[in-house]
Image: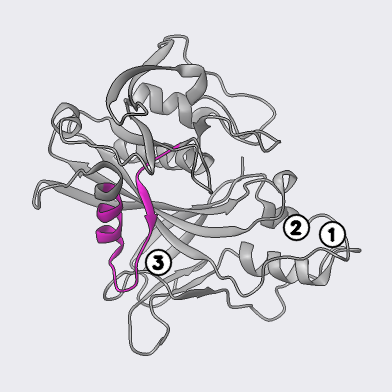
Amino acid sequence: MIHPQMLCLNFPGTLGKPAFLSTPRAEGRRRGPPEGTNQDAANYSHIMAAARVLLLLSGRRESRGQLLLSDRPFLGSSARLPLQRPPFCPFAALNQQPMPPETKLPKNRGVDLGVAIILQSSDKTVLLTRRTRTLKVSPNLWVPPGGHVELDEELLDGGLRELCEETRLQLPQGQFSWVPLGLWESAYPPRLSWGLPKYHHIIVYLLVVSQESQQQLQARIQPNPSEVSAFIWLDTDVAAAVAATEDGTETPRHLSQDLPPSVLAVELEEDGRARPLALPMSTLLQTTPTTTEVKERVSTGTKFALRLWLQHLCT
């Protein structure tokens, strides 16, 4: 496990989608690439994997607000959250192994900002959705509702919009509260053994606590079949078991013997109708494969977010 680096954040003005992301380089802090490493690969991985980032909320820095993340306190910082990436992060791997001279990496592509909603019901369960198998990026993964934040859109508004687009679920004003949980560095493909990374995101996980019960919320859910093939509610015991299955570790953590063999989910049939699904617990405990097989599992970033959610419940 890689322990999360704590970042200081500043949320001045309106939070929104960055037009681009830059990673300022501190003089004297950058190490040279390993011997034999392609220089473009080394530069690319350093830029894309750096922990200190500046997310610009518009193309003109002087005219709009900024979401500023730094690995040290700064004047005006207003929050302190963890930023983590998986142990097998391909950007980190690019800095640790030689690359063939002919290696061609994507250029002129920054880091996109995404937001994901950890929706907690009043009876302390959280909602996950399964991405359809036909999606180009991360198919068949269990994740919280979320996606890209649009220009001039606040983080919370972006997350609630994505929640509505994926599930048709709208939360009444005044009947929920929210708090940022943490940030996750996401790459796709997620392992270098799958191929060179093509997409890079910083995902902001927001905990949204509804005053409505799971039953009340579920009654209004209508999954969007183009994005969602199933959804499930996890209680704290199941979430703890899922969060404990560390991707990239050799020794599995101890899991409770009291876990149910399956968890009740709702799956969409081909005709769009919903039906109950007894999802095997073993599916929820799957880890990221080393090959490119499309294996149904909970994403590594989601496990990170579930750990943060459980910690939040204890505070």
> Which of 69 and 188 lies nearest the eye of the viewer?
188
In the image, residue 31 above or below residue 246: below
Colour setup of the view: one colour
Q: Residue furthest front?
A: 271
In the image, residue 89 above or below residue 299: below
Name the quadrant containing residue 114. Answer: bottom left
Q: CA distance from mark 2 to mark 3?
A: 27 Å
Q: Residues within 10 Å of mark 1 (few under 14, many from 20)?
A: some
What is the three-letter code of the residue carrying label 2? Leu
User: In screen coordinates, is 72 left or right of 224?
Assistant: right
Residue bearing the label numbered 1 = 99
- The image shows residue 18 at horizontal and vertical percentages of 42, 72
- The image shows residue 91 at horizontal and vertical percentages of 68, 57
Residues tagged 2 and 3 counted as in contact (Cβ below 8 A): no
Task: Write the start and end of the magenta stretch as one range.
Answer: 142-163
- Residue at the image position 27 percent from the left and 58 percent from the top: 156
- Residue at the image position 70 percent from the left and 45 percent from the top: 194
Mark sitting on residue 94: 2
Is residue 291 a member of the stretch shown in magenta? no
User: In screen coordinates, is 64 left or right of 92?
Assistant: left
Viewer can see residue 12: yes
Viewer can see residue 259: no
Give whichever of discs 1 and 3 has the lower sequence position: 3
